[in-house]
Image (cartoon, rainbow, N blue to C red):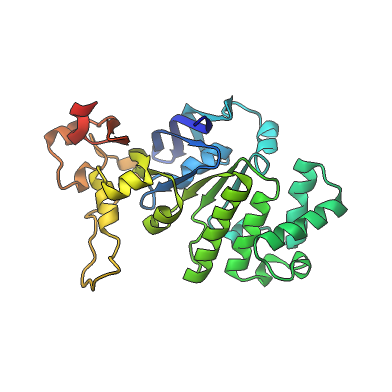
């Protein structure tokens, strides 16, 4: 399958008072048309920074120091802000983690939906209004004409998330980036939001990058999975292969920490320790201090990505198979 998006060797650095910290280090992946890629890992592993890098929405203290980001073969790094504005919301759209802060509290829902249609699609305001009402209907919002006149604070969390999705898909993007789209929503609304995203993939052939810490969500929706730890890729492959036979000790730990539904559990499995802070990365394998299998070699050198049964795994256990 030809890649819609291809990210190679992405490195993102932040300037802090204590010096330069590398938040994302050598991340590579690709996603084809109509494909869903799940990016998983604990908080602080680089999931959101990776997604913001694609849209070049990083803060002023951050820079993409190395790598390549290509959309349909076109290099995005180096484009002017004006050129990126034409891509954001049009070819690549994003559902942000918190719809309450992502939506403008001073504008009505209608105003926020109409603007991208006028800017990117060339609609008149009247046609954009009609289209906005239709998009709200598609995402399951009742009485859309009424909602168009309301402000974000007047809507529930699930409703605001649907509005965010409506804004994201209104211009029929090639790629949708969803950063924790179901966080803080109740289980019923979570299921509806995920079903809505799957419908978008089916009806519009939109590729989706789903960023989450919920392995269950990834198992239900994604085709492939990218596991990040401390800014590095530790495992990358199909959801089927990784869930059936996880190779990296970190991936094994993530999956074993999911409570089984079939039996009573008194104590949940956990991964000992915490993700290292960006300025305090260990020498050698970044997961080494938490890994039950780590040896001296792991503490001295960083492993590469080794092909194992169709997946890529960053662990010295598989180095001989490279």
* Image height of 265 relative to 103, above or below: below
Q: Position of residue 180 (x, y in %)?
A: 49, 55
User: Which one is nearer the viewer's eye here, 240 or 94?
Assistant: 240
Instruction: Answer left or right for 250 relative to 162.
Output: left
* Image height of 303 relative to 133, above or below: above
**Residue occupying image coordinates x 70% and y 50%:** 170
Q: Where is residue 11 in the image (x, y as percent from the top left)?
A: 43, 32
**Residue occupying image coordinates x 36% and y 49%:** 41
* Image height of 261 relative to 64, above or below: below
Q: Which residue lies furthest to the left in this view?
A: 296
Q: Quadrant of the C terminus?
A: top left
User: Which one is nearer the viewer's eye here, 24 or 6?
Assistant: 6
User: Which one is nearer the viewer's eye here, 25 or 28?
Assistant: 28
Tag count: 0
Q: Where is residue 190 in the image (x, y as percent from the top left)?
A: 50, 65
Instruction: Answer left or right for 88 relative to 241.
Output: right
Residue 107 visible in rendering: no
* Image height of 184 relative to 305, above or below: below
Instruction: Answer left or right for 222 relative to 80.
Output: left
Q: Position of residue 278 (x, y in %)?
A: 36, 42
Residue 200 visible in rendering: yes
**Residue occupying image coordinates x 76% and y 56%:** 132
């Amino acid at each position: 399958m030809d890649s819609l998006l291809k990210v190679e060797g992405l490195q993102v650095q932040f300037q802090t008072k204590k010096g330069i910290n590398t938040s994302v280090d050598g991340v590579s992946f690709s996603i084809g048309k109509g494909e869903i890629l799940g990016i998983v890992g604990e908080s602080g592993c680089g999931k959101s920074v990776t997604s913001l890098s694609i849209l070049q929405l990083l803060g002023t203290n951050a820079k993409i120091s190395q790598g390549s980001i290509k959309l349909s073969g076109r290099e995005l790094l180096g484009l002017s802000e004006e050129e990126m504005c034409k891509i954001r919301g049009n070819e690549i759209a994003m559902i942000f983690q918190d719809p309450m802060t992502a939506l403008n509290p001073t504008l009505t829902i209608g105003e926020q939906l109409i603007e991208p249609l006028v800017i990117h699609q060339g609609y008149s305001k009247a046609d954009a209004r009609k289209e906005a009402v239709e998009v709200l209907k598609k995402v399951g919002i009742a009485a859309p004409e009424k909602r168009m006149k309301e402000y974000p604070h007047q809507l529930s969390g699930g409703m605001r998330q649907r509005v965010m999705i409506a804004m994201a898909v209104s211009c029929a993007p090639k790629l949708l980036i969803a950063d924790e789209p179901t966080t803080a929503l109740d289980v019923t609304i979570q299921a509806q939001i995920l079903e809505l995203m799957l419908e978008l993939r089916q009806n519009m052939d939109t590729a989706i990058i789903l960023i989450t810490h919920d392995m269950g969500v990834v198992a239900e929706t994604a085709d492939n999975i990218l596991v990040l730890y401390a800014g590095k890729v530790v495992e990358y492959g199909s959801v089927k292969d990784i869930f059936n036979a996880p190779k990296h000790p970190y991936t094994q730990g993530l999956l074993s920490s999911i409570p089984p539904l079939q039996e009573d559990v008194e104590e949940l499995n956990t991964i000992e320790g915490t993700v290292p802070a960006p300025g305090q990365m260990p020498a050698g394998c970044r997961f080494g201090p938490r890994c039950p299998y780590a040896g001296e070699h792991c503490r001295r050198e960083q492993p590469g990505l080794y092909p194992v049964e169709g997946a890529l795994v960053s662990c010295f256990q598989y180095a001989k198979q490279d």
